[in-house]
Image: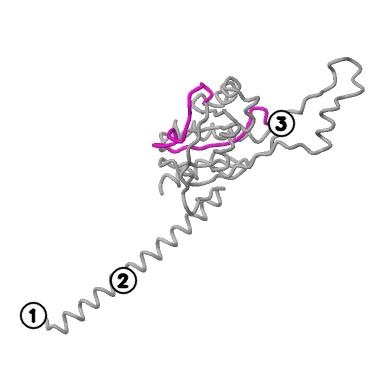
Amino acid sequence: MPLSRRSKIKWTVFLTVDVLLGAVVLFLFLIRSERDEQLALRELGTSIYPVANQIQPFELTTHDQQTFTEEDLLGQWSLIFYGFTNCPNVCPMSMAELDKFYTQLVDDNAGEIPQVIMATVDPDRDTPAEMTSYVTRFNPAFTGLTGGIEELENLASQLYVVISSDLAEGEMENAMEGDEHAGHAGMGSTEVPEGTFNHSGHISVINPEGQLYAVMRLPHLDQQIMGSYKMLLDR
């Protein structure tokens, strides 16, 4: 028997309410899933930025003396770490862990292979030749970036990397005075000691659209990097 006009209206209302309730349930599920995912990433030392920021123009030089710009960040994931070749501990440890992560990812064919980049905070000493020797020691597939200090700071500021080369006043005085009791010419040190840079140690994650997408905080461990990277890919 054909439905009356009133019945049709009731069914329409019921269906509309069901659809709205389904949408609300789905929305709440997605919010909870997103929250759980964010918590899981944070336990791995990774946070996703609320808004992905497009990397603005910059121009640097790779360790093999090729021009590297924001265009080279498009079409693939990139992990960028700021450091310097004379760094005594954090930089080599982080680079070694990145190598373990990268090698396992390649061996397992476990996902898109990102480009791993180390940009220097010490361009005066970290020439392309120095960067080549340092970066390829960890992995020949890695890229080292150097160039003018203004361009390095330009990219660093976009990645929220803080760089400081200041020494404590006493350290600077000692460095410049040298050792008065050395006894032989040339034995005293009049150079600023190596390893005087303080800098942020996080890894910046750039998505294939060339946007700053996430950050991986210290300490960097290969399995945590792997777990975070796979979760980011799944998103």
Residue type of the residue flagged with mark 1: Pro
The secondary element bearing badge 1 is classed as loop
Mark 3 neighbour class, 10 Å CA radius: few under 14, some 14 to 19, many 20 or more: some
Q: Is 47 covered by the magenta stretch?
A: no
Residue for badge 3: 195
Q: Of the numbered discs in the image, which one, if any, rests on residue 2?
A: 1
* 86 magenta-colored: yes
Q: Position of 219 compared to 38: left or right?
A: right
Q: CA distance from mark 3 to mark 1?
A: 86 Å
Q: Amino acid at mark 2?
A: Leu
Which residues lie in the magenta part?
Answer: 62-88
Q: Which residue is mark 2?
A: 20
Question: Given contact means CB atoms under 8 Å apart, are the residues at marks 2 and 3 in contact?
Answer: no
User: What x and y, as percent, mark residue 37?
Assistant: 47, 54
Give the mark nearer the N terminus: 2 vs 1.
1
Tags 3 and 1 touching, CB below 8 Å: no
Spatial CA distance of label 2 from label 3 is 61 Å
Q: Residue at x 44, y 38 (%)?
A: 77
Q: Secondary structure at mark 2?
A: helix
Q: Point out residue 9 in the picture as x, y percentages from the top left corner.
A: 19, 80
Which residue lies at the image location 83% right of the left edge and 16% below the top edge?
Answer: 186
Quadrant of the rendered image containing residue 131: top right
